[in-house]
Amino acid sequence: MALFGKKLPTPLDGVDVVLADLDGVVYAGPGAIPHAVESLNRAESEGRKIGFITNNASRTDASVAQHLAELGLHTVADDIVTSPQAAVTLLAQKVPTGSTILVVGGEGLVTELEKAGYVVTRSAEDSPAAVLQGFNPDVAWTDLAEAAYALKTPEEEGGIPWIATNTDWTIPRERGIAPGNGTLVSAVHTAVGRLATVAGKPEAPIFHAATKRFGAQKPLFIGDRLDTDIQGAQAAGMESVLVLTGIDRPKQVLAAPPHSRPTYIVGDLRDLFEPYPEIKQKNRVTTVGSAKIRTSDGPEIEILSEGDNQLDLLRAAAHAIWSTDRAIFGFHVPEILYRDTFHRQ
């Protein structure tokens, strides 16, 4: 694609480090998402570093790296920045090394705590100095109950800190979308009436840690969720890509609030290498490729041209709605703009 004889840039132009989420971007359950592995390997072969930021606390960085290597990526443990690592860094600011920590979660949390010199317990009867909670598919009601017992006193009244690796409401699995760590954290919150401090996405520190680890000058973050991935990247001052292979769909894209709007919207990771169409806006008409959307002071959204593909139509509709600074419920959105023709693992 060219404009006035000049080739349009791709999302990867000028990027030295590609940072990607895992669930919904690279894999869903044990299997790779179509085109993800080949695209990331291509980006690496063209001279970019590839790193990963994950909120999933159920596994260690080493086990995640092994999984990615089995899928065909050239990944080692140090390429993985995890929410347990961010949580332990935050914990160290509150609780001295050597303290006993109640863990709700799996091996990923336990390994990072032990590496940092903490003692792990699963019982509130061991007088833990803090509760650290992260996702694990084997977390049971009894684990949540132990956390509630330990957290019965609010922190401002002398109670212990409560740190959650993340609060993702859902997680993509091979059979579909399942409850995530946010659901489990919410269960404890309901029982004790207090909020956890969140260490991972969408908080900026985990993104800053990744930028520092990989020495990034111009990083690009790829995620499938607006409320954690894209919001976090924006908070960290990082350009972002929303890929439509995971959680968030066209309806969520159109409704995205200002703090969670991506720089780029792609169908799958092959689109990283394609010239990204220019977003043109004039007289309330937004044009992307051959797709054109017009807005007005009223609630109507007019489709002047559906264009050549659904992705450009979605891009045009999103930028048209976003440019009005009005919430999505203030519009009559044509059903075609919600059409979801994109692959979802």
Image: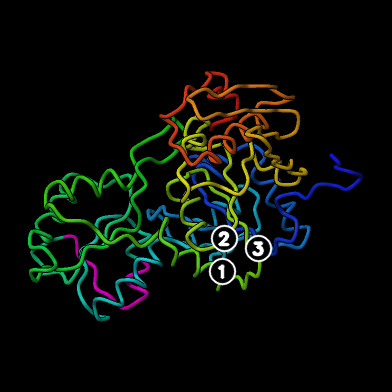
Snapshot quadrant of residue 339: top right
Give whichever of discs 1 and 2 has the lower sequence position.
1
Residue at image point 50% right, 68% down:
208
The reply to whether discs 1 and 2 touch (Cβ–Cβ < 8 Å) is yes
Residue at image point 37% right, 73% down:
89
The reply to whether discs 3 and 1 touch (Cβ–Cβ < 8 Å) is yes
> Looking at this view, is 55 or 142 the one in front?
55
Count every numbered label the image shows and give the total.
3
Residue at mark 2:
238
Residue 58 percent coordinates (x, y): 37, 53
Magenta range is 111-122
Q: Amino acid at mark 3?
A: Val
Q: How is the image coloured?
A: rainbow
Q: Amino acid at mark 1?
A: Thr
Residue at image point 71% right, 62% down:
48
Residue at mark 1:
211
**Judging from the image, what secondary structure is the residue with disc 1 in?**
helix
Residue 170 to residue 13: above or below: above
Residue 116 to residue 289: above or below: below
Give whichever of discs 3 and 1 has the lower sequence position.
3
Q: Residues within 10 Å of mark 2 (few under 14, many from 20)?
A: many
> Looking at this view, is 59 or 304 the one in front?
304
Which label is found at residue 17?
3
Rounded to the nearest angstrom, the CA distance separating label 3 from label 2 is 11 Å
Residue 43 percent coordinates (x, y): 73, 54
Residue at image point 67% right, 39% down:
281
Snapshot quadrant of residue 123: bottom left
Give whichever of discs 3 and 2 has the lower sequence position.
3
